[in-house]
Amino acid sequence: MNSLHAQLLQLAIATPLVAALIMAGGLPKRFAVKLAGVAFVVPALIAAWLWQQFPAEGGASYHYLSNLDTGLGRFGITLKLGLNGIALPLFLLAATVGLAAGLYALRSGAERLRLYLTLLLIMQGGLLGVFASVDIFFFYFFHELALIPTFIMVGLWGGRDRNYAAMKMTIYLTAGALLSLLGLIAIYVKSGAQSFDLIELKAVLAHQGLAPTVQKYIFGLLLFGFGTLVSLWPLHTWAPLGYGAAPSSAAMLHAGVLKKFGLYGLIQIALPLLPVGAQTWAWPLALLAGIGNVLVIGLITLAQRDLKQMLGYSSVMHMGYCFLGIACLSTIGSGGVVLLMVAHGLSVALLFMLATSVHHRTHTFDLTEMGGLAQKTPVLAACFVAGTMASIGLPAFANFWGELAIFVALWKFSPGLTAVAVAGVVISAIYGLRAVARIFFGPPSEHLQQVMAQHPPADLGWGERLPALILLAALLWLGFYPQALSRSIDQALPVGLAKVSVGSVTVSPAQP
Amino acid sequence: MNPVHTTLLILLLPLFSAAVIALGLRRQGAWAAGLSTAVAGAIAILSGQLIFSGQRNFPAAWEWLRLGDFVVSLGFKFDDLAALMLFVVSFVGFLIHIFSLGYMRADAARARFFGGLSIFMFSMLGIVLADNLFMIFIFWELVGFSSYLLIGHWHERTAAAEAAKKAFIVNRVGDFGFLLGIIMCYWSNGTVNLTALGAQHVPSTLIALLLFCGAAGKSAQLPLQVWLPDAMEGPTPVSALIHAATMVAAGIYLLCRINVLMVPEALTVIMWIGTLTALYAALCAVVQRDIKKVLAYSTLSQLGYMVAAFGLGSLTLRHEMGGVVHEMVVATGVGAAMFHLTTHAFFKALLFLGSGSVIHGCHHEQDIFKMGGLRAKMPLTFITFTLGVLAIIGMPGLAGFFSKDAILYLALEKNTAVFAVLVFTAVLTSFYMIRLWKLTFWGTVRSDHAAQAHESGFTMTLPLVVLAVLSIIGGYAGFFSRLAGAVADLVPEATGAAHSTILLVSLGVMLTGASGAWLFYASAETDSLEGKFRLGFRGLTGLKESFDRLYTYYVAKVQQRLAMLLNFIEQIFLAGLLIRGLGGVVTLIGYGARSLYTGSLHTYVYWFLLGTALLWAFAVGIF
């Protein structure tokens, strides 16, 4: 049975990649669209099935393991796939957002649709691979595989400033990826494990940890490498620009899923392997994230007039919460981060998609040029309000649980920073609701009246409604029933992490 | 039926209703209205059964989230306090659903309205039943959301959209403190379960005050009161249910829930905030022209009374015994506050629904100076509204008389200054309510709308009658004690000389205010207050606007400017103008990467492929 599941896991990753290959081979367009649809649906079904079959008490170890020789054995690299309690939620996220972005792309009417879908499928395959990789070389490799199509998609189908945005994204993200690769290789070299297999690395380093100075340097490399990829302030400037320019499906997959690569790397690899390094960096990280990402970027988000830029900045801001959760070095904090990663992935994908839907109807992203759209498109308005509420952490949506756990953990780390972080919740309510009001409520602006006179806006069609409903349903499901994922996350978080700080009420947090 | 199942059903039925309406009845307004009302009726029946069955404190808790040692649970704490609140929410809620059937009949978005009401019922019932602070917070935010939906029901009007946004954001400011308070409470006590906290906790002024922030936001106490008057942009049944009878009272309910966590210093602050809110709002009410705004400020003022009562009556008593100082927290404040909350829910819901009936009858005219003479045209509305007015100004024998007297008595015993302010506020209450009543129902007809006014239909007048009956009997021990159980025993009762003092004072207060208004607004074409006391009128108007001005100034001039400034700096970075000049990591990364990739996408792809190929080739042993 287990080998069947392992094969299913391989199949989930292979399907979009093989489909992309066939399509690149010159499949006629009408078949290509159908094939792409199938290739987006299959991984989602498999992911749901694997989630359902996941052992109730088995979050701590890897399941569905398989090991494929790729000819790189002499470096200790094998394509080892499997899911543990932390990987499972993110794999599910990748499959869900991939499905939504794929369905949206099928009906998006993009130019050169076949190429667009091919690139999206490569991205999707890479993303699924990232979170299913136990081998940290392949973890990195799949990330690059997903990253390249992003650049191309921004460059080819992007909006305003696409060339500059694509270049800037490329520079920052490649540099970040290189730094983290350096860190990963350093772990490989210093551990002496002769293997990139995370399970083996963990076993070796649990037995004999790396020297504190070494840990400090490697963690620093990983922190700023991964940090750049996740838009840690002040290395975030690629994000609003890139997302502002990216076509919607690419933005959905990148902001929703690919960006989580860095956080995932920190939680799954850096924290358990480099506990001492993590302690050294906890305070700098918390300050950058708390003051920079949450407060400064939060205020900057207030000043945005462009809807997509606003979403980009708000996404940077919410990554601040994830970094704060990581800095707590506790089970509560890291658990909150994993929950928030999933929740944010779903909600930001939903909002980027709906922003494009708004653009189709208003022909602008400028918030001051909109207004009154809710009268014409009530379903779009309802979905957008729901997405905004999810993103600003309203209970009943998944994001709330992640933020709550992070705030609770953060108090033990620093009450002052908790106050800053919770103040961010007020800020996000202001920009979120302001945007909703400007787009949908009140009377339409003059610009919009002209646009609507020429193109009467229609409400969400099924091509847009279905992906929106998938994402919303997932957000609500986790909002009402967080245990669906939190159980396995809780089991998977290393016990050692709890010992470092917040495990129990009496133990004091990491030193400032 | 098992009480746990009944409670679960009460909580989940409105959620079911909201989900069905959102998914399938968006275009079927009549069906949505029917479903939502039927569910509200079912809740009322189930609640009645639960309340009067006498079952209390049955164990019911489920784990909702667990990460490490941190557990959030979903559980019920059903004691006499919760039972009383459940009665108020479910019965007043049901009556307002019935009223809405008539009031919203012609509304195009009726389904959304009733879906919103169901979400509200779900959230509010969650607060009432919750057994721990995290769960209260969750439903607390959800009530805020349903309030947002319903205030903004007519979202095509900018004023309504703005009011909805303002309500949500101001509430979030309160919740900022509330959440911090809960987290702090969690870490210092190891639990947020209300029963466990009652058994043992570490006293802390900071926790008490932070938790009070939440109550101040939801119950619109100074300085967070600004959202409530604006919230009147919502349909009138919403104002009655959410912004008068139940949601805004949730703050008072919360305080009574966490009574045990209170410390003297915090209670003093709470007492003064309540007292000042009562006075401030009553002053503002005197100069309002809009029938709903008068009632909104009146609600604020009455909420101030409740908060003040809580602060007064829960003060710690010190007494020495054998050289040892004993401290004891008394809960008479809880009794007085909850008593007034209950009677206020009846008569204020009645007044709002009455105003809704008037507005409906007058074709959406809301200016009381354009009404007049409606007594004969809307007799049933007139009679019930009159009972509501008499109840709020404290006519002996009606509900408001008893509950307000309990508060005044408490003030007389504990703090003379507070007593004086509350008595003066009572004069004002009597004044502005009689002003409203006279201008609306008496005198000459002053506009075409008022001339064509007609009595409302059965679904609208029935709730008025029921609420009028409740406004009469709600204050009697025979009714309230049966409903409130142990909470009723906490209500302070004046005896002997104090009893006569209070009775005389409140009668004098009522008559002064009422006769003042009756004589002053003898003929009411325009606001005679504005004509005769121009300076005073301006002062009061200015007072009303001062908070809004201050906050607008802060938002526009401080916060937004800071945001613009930060954004300007950010844009410079974004545009890359400074990237070369600034040195440091960013520059290095930029240069390093640029020299490698020369900014071309395709180059990057080639590098990637080349690297992969080389690695593979090397590994397989080609070279």
Image (cartoon, coloured by chain):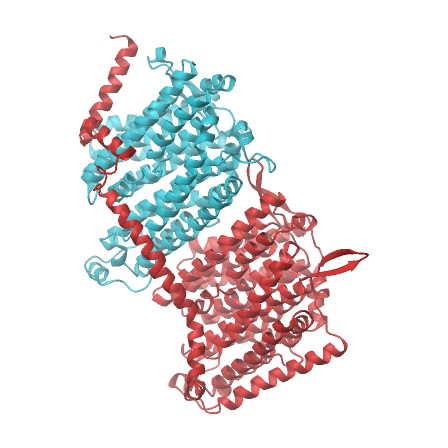
State the image coordinates of residue B554 (x, y, percent, origin top left): 38, 61
State the image coordinates of residue B27 (x, y, percent, origin top left): 39, 59
Chain B rendering hue = red
Tell whether B515 sits left or right of B293.
Answer: right
Chain A rendering hue = cyan
Q: Residue furthest right?
A: B322
Question: Viewer-proximal residue, A284 or A160?
Answer: A284
Q: Residue furthest front?
A: B323
Question: Viewer-proximal residue, A381 or A432?
Answer: A432
Query: Visible in this render: residue B90?
Result: no
* Total marks in image: 0
Q: Quadrant of residue B321?
A: bottom right
Q: Quadrant of residue B429?
A: bottom right
Q: Which residue appears at 52% of the width and 75% of the height?
A: B282
Tell whether B280 sits left or right of A386.
Answer: right
Question: Viewer-proximal residue, A378 or B143?
Answer: B143
Q: Which residue appears at 58% of the width and 78% of the height?
A: B424
The answer to whether residue B596 is above or below residue B274 is: above
State the image coordinates of residue A509 (x, y, percent, origin top left): 53, 36
The answer to whether residue B566 is above or below residue B591 is: below
Query: Visible in this render: residue A35?
Result: yes
Tell whether A456 sits left or right of A4.
Answer: left
State the image coordinates of residue A97 (x, y, percent, origin top left): 36, 38
Q: Which residue appears at 48% of the width and 35% of the height?
A: A334
Tell whether A158 sits left or right of B439.
Answer: left
